[in-house]
Image (spheres, rainbow, N blue to C red):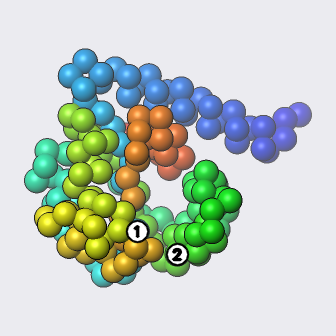
Amino acid sequence: MMNNKFLTILVFIIIGISLAVMLSNNRKNNMQYTLSIIKPDATARNLTADINKFFTDKSLTVVAQKELLLSEEQAQNFYIEHKNRPFYGGLVEYMTSGPVVVQVLKGEDAITKNREIMGATNPKNAAEGTIRKEFAESLERNSVHGSDSEESAKREISFFFDYDEVTKK
């Protein structure tokens, strides 16, 4: 009899492999998928539609989306690579402080394009016309998250979405 941790890991591996196959099928024209999170400060101000307009105006398509209230365990696991950094505890607390909108964006060079649309992590350094310049309240409450590489996108998408939730628009 398998224990729950083993089954959970096995499910994540299967989902990850399925998503990797789907994502790699779009490499011909550099079509990519990336994860976007609209963070608690932005959802509290009802900015989801405004933020999504930034994406669609730059030719990114939202192909999967759901609103969640992250548990402490989910936030800890999602941001595990930051565990030993001084901001980790505050980040986990912030990400569990209210609803988030997790979504998959699709488009040509979606990872790079999304990062450009978001702007610099610190809104003081963000370019005009970016989400963070427009909406972020501070470095810590910077309204959005986006995958920083193909590897991160695959891991992050599979963290929140099953293969069949990511449509092929």
**Furthest-front residue in view?**
125
Cβ atoms at labels 2 and 1 below 8 Å apart: yes
Separation (CA) of disc 2 from disc 1? 9 Å
Provide the residue designation for mark 2.
Answer: 94
* Residue sitting at x 60%, y 57%: 82
- Look at the picture and state if 49 lies above or below 169: below
Residue 127 visible in this rendered orientation of the protein:
yes
- Quadrant (top left, top right, bottom left, bottom right) of the N terminus: top right
Categorize mark 2 by other alpha carbons within 10 Å: few (<14), some (14-19), many (20+): some
Q: Is residue 130 above or below residue 103?
A: below
Q: Position of residue 100 (x, y in %)?
A: 43, 67
Secondary structure of the residue carrying tag 2 is helix
Residue 30, horizontal then vertical, whole percent: 24, 26
Seen in the picture, residue 43 relative to 164 is either above or below; the reply is below
Residue at image location 64% in from the left, 36% down from the top: 11
Give the number of callouts.
Answer: 2
In this view, the residue farthest toward the left is 57
Is 19 positioned to the left or the right of 27 in the image? Answer: right
Residue 132 in view of the camera: no
- What residue is disc 1 on? 39
Q: Residues within 10 Å of mark 1 (few under 14, many from 20)?
A: many
